[in-house]
Structures are given as C-alpha cells and as structure tokens.
Amino acid sequence: MTHSRFLRSKSIWSLLLATIVTVAPGASGQEGKGASANDWFVKSAKDRKEQLQQGIKGGEKRDIIPSVPGSPIPQTDRLKPPSPDFLLAKVKWGKAAIIGDELTQDWNLAPNDMLEFHKKARSKGFKYMPTQTAIQDFSFDPALMPSILLGGVRELNFSPEAINRLRKYVLDGGMIVCDSVYGSPWFYESAKKLFDDMFPESRFRKLPPDHPLFHMVIDIDTATYRSGGKEENGKPFMEGLYIGSRIGVLVSKYGLGCGLAGEMKVFDQLEKKGLKPKAYSMETARLIGENLAPYIIGYGRVGEAEGKAELFGKLDENAPTSEFIFAQVKHEGAWNAHPGAARQLLMQLEKDSAIPVNLKRVSIDLERDEINAYPFLFFTGLDDFVLTGKQIDALRKHVTRGGTLVVNNALGLATFHQAVVREMRRAFPQSDLALLPQSHEIFRNLNSIKRVKYTPTLMKDKGELLQGRPVLFGAKVGGRLCLLYSPYDLEGGWNEVRYPLSRGYQSASAKKLGCNIIMYAMEH
C-alpha cells in the first residue's frame, strides 16, 4: 500500500490518527544508542501471515502439556482437563508509525517470532497456537493465558490501571517475557524500570548458569551473539524478577525475536545508521525459545500453587508464646523462594507431634527486628547474597544465645551454595560445615530416616553417589550444633509442588527431615 493510498483510507486513518507517528529514515545515532528511541524503529521483515493447523477439534480430548523435563507428570494428572490452547500471547502495545509506505507498530517489529516459537514447541509435543492480544482486551488470568510477550524498541509504558492488573497477573502465577527485539537500550532500560517499580519487594537478578531456564530441554552452557555480547564471554545473559522460585518477569537485554524468526538482515540496516544493536545469534535465540516453552509450562504450575499461598504480611500481632514459630530471614538475595511451604511443613509437624505450632511464618529483618523471641531461624535463597556486618552480628548473637540457624538451598543451585559456604565462613570463621553422619540423632528423633527419595534431576546427577542417604551439613559454635545446611532443596518438597529441574528432596522425605530438624532445634 502506498503512502498516498493509505492517507485516502479515511476509515483506517481516523481510527489510528491518535496513535500514529512518522519515523524519518536515517536518524543519527549517539554513541550507538541513537538520538531517540525512534532511531531503532525499523521492521525486521514482512509478516508471513502463516497459519498453524488447529491442534484440536471440537470434543476431542488430548493432553496439551506433555511431561516437562525434571518434573514428570503422573498419569492421574495427565488425565485431568488440559491447560488452555494458548501459551505465550504477543501483547499489542505502543504507537503505530509509518516507515516509508508501511504502517508498523511497536509490538510487532519481528512479526514472525511467535510463529517460529510455536512451530518448535509443537514439534516437541506442545500443541499451542500463537495468538495476539491488546492490553485492554487481555483477561489477566494465568489459567487462560500462562504468559505474555512484550517486545519492542521504544520505551515501554502502561496506564496505572494496566500496571496494577499486570502485577496481579504475575502474582497469580502468570509470566511476562520482555524482548528488546534489537537490543534497544530505550526498551531495555524502560522495561526494567517499569517492573522494578511494579515489584518494589523484588529486583531483577542475573540468572545463574545452572538456572532451569538454561537446561529445560537443551543445556545452554554457551551462547553466540549476532551483535554485541562480548562482555558475556560466550555465556547466555538473561535477567529475571523472582516471584517465589519462579521467574515472574523475564527480560532479555539481547534481542530474541529476529533470531527466533530467522530474519537477521535488519541488523545490517541498524548498524549502517550508526546504532549498536545487541542480539543473540539465530542458533542461540532458538535454543532459548526451545527451553522457554517447557519452563513456562512447568513453572506455571508452580505459580498456580504459590500464587494461592499466603505471602508475608505484618509480623504476628500476638506476643510470642510457647508455640513453635517459624521465623524466616530476609536478605538481599531471592529469600522468599517457596511461598506457602513453611505452612505445609508446620501442618505436618502439628499432625505428627505434640509440639504446639503457630502456622503463620514470620519474616525477620536482621538489621531492624528483635530476634530474641525466635530461637529458630530459617534462611533460604536461589542465588548470590552478601551479608552485612549487622546481619552477621545478629546471627552470631542468635546462636550464642542458644538459637539455631537452618539454611536451605532452594532448587539446589550452585550459585547459592557457593554464597552459603562463603558467607557462613565470614559469619562463623572458627566453625566449619561438616557432613552429619547417618547415625546422628537428627535422623531418628521424630522420624527414623535411613533412606530418602530425591528429585529426578538430582537422582540423574548424583543418584549413584548419594545412594538414597539424607544429606545435611552442620557446624558447631561453642561446642553446640547450631548451624544446619541442606545443599539440596528441602523447602520445595514441603510445598508438594513439582519444581522442574530442582535438585532436592521429594515431598514425603522433605517433610520427615524438616520435622526432625525442628524437633532437634527445640530440644537443643
């Protein structure tokens, strides 16, 4: 359609006039960023308008969700009603613009990315259909749409109402994927600010190399880049905002869409304008896409469970009593890894013992809160953290006064393990963590624990080495065992949710060991 013919189409023009801007070709760049976000506004390819075959006929029964790696689905679950026909919806947002003689929109600069993403997903047994939705028409219901894609090059912004609804959508179990299509700093920086402001209780974190997203189907240990990426040293770089143990918002600093679609010529055009795009190679983009589909599915189930859990609110208004209180330490890392898990464990403890239990866990800020009333402190996380001087002093006082500190490696990730070893050495330099022998009373005080069951991923990695033995490390301070550390995820098992690629204990074993740990802490 020519520019003049478009102007003569009054019905279309009147509909779009309020949201159309004109982008002049050949805008100059400033140190590779450009004078404005409009400099990046170039469409990568024509929309192929290819339609995928509908995956189901009326009345037909099928399982949309095959087993996710590291989280096999029991046959009983597979026979339940399947999830919706859509997995990842592309959100229509931003303004339209005329580039040359073609109407182009912010959200669709890589028009064929979701077509190829779904082709690959369908080849792996995921029978989902690509779809698009305007933000004002979106249901904001994860049960109907597990995830949404926000892609573009210009600044991302939404109305206060949309922001509130997007926040609730993520907290309810939905996932948002942000793709800076060409690596535009304008989009990338605005997306991070938007969601940082939306979730002040969390912050974006670089995903560690052993994060499930990089290993769901294919091990992505290395990455190649079409543009930029030298500072990543051949490794993938993705940032996530955690809600519990799952990524609620994923941001890709490096463009994915063109690589997914296999349409890379646009980067030559951008570089000729003096811009410095950042993008994955086609090969790496497609590997990430191949892992993204099962991650959305597997951790979507996690979101359904954890989204219903009671999150931390105010401290218990009642004064502490003789009841056992589960106090959890807040720290700079992803400290709230498994919402609702503590309550599940405490319900089991209440059932299996005569211990009076307060079912509401309490969150503790070591720099501000008085912790004398909480002899049991639980500390967990997903990635790196660094303790402050005040936090170290508080932990030392806690154990010297007779308290117990229990540390758990949520999902069993290497980065958190390394941080635990480093920070506990800082906090307790005279006390080394040592493996507790199987004869230790902690394995036989409430429940006799001779063998445990581990998650499939941990069994695959270390099953022969572990031989079903429970693994706990401990350290003594002043001759008393007061620091306990589980390098494999205990807490996830308390929640009775399958966490794909988690290295931890299965539910029954996790609950028995968790109850024993609490019993030991109360008696010593």
Image: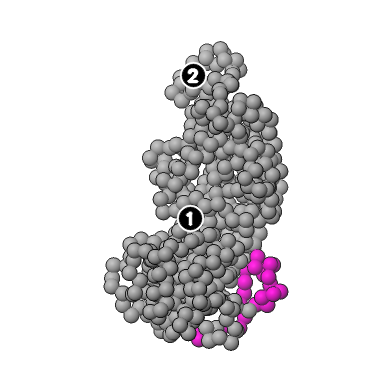
Disc number for residue 243? 1
* Dot 1 or dot 2, earlier in sequence: 2
> Which picture quadrant has residue 182?
top right
Whether residue 464 appears in magenta in the rendering, the answer is yes
Q: Residue, x 62% and y 74% (percent of image)?
A: 453
403 vs 132: above or below = below
Residue at the location (61% across, 38% down)? 278
Residue 239 visible? The answer is: yes
Query: Quadrant of the image for the C terminus?
Result: bottom left
The answer to whether residue 92 is visible is: no
Residue 4, position in %: x, y?
56, 12
Relative placement, left or right, of 311 versus 52 is left
Residue 424 x/y as whole percent: 50, 70
Residue located beneath label 2 in the image: 13
- Mark 1, Cα crowd under 10 Å, few <14 / some 14-19 / many 20+, is many
The number of numbered discs placed on residues in the rendered structure image is 2
Q: Residue at x 62, y 61 (%)?
A: 501
Whole-percent x, y for residue 208 in the image? 59, 56
Tell me the kind of residue under disc 1.
Ile
Nearer to me, 397 or 492: 397
CA gap between label 1 and label 2 equals 42 Å
- Which quadrant of the rendered structure holds the N terminus? top right
* Position of residue 62 measured from the top left corner of the image (x, y, whole percent): 64, 53
The residue under the point 60% across, 63% down is: 414
10 displayed left or right of 121: left
Q: Nearer the viewer, residue 176 or 386?
A: 386
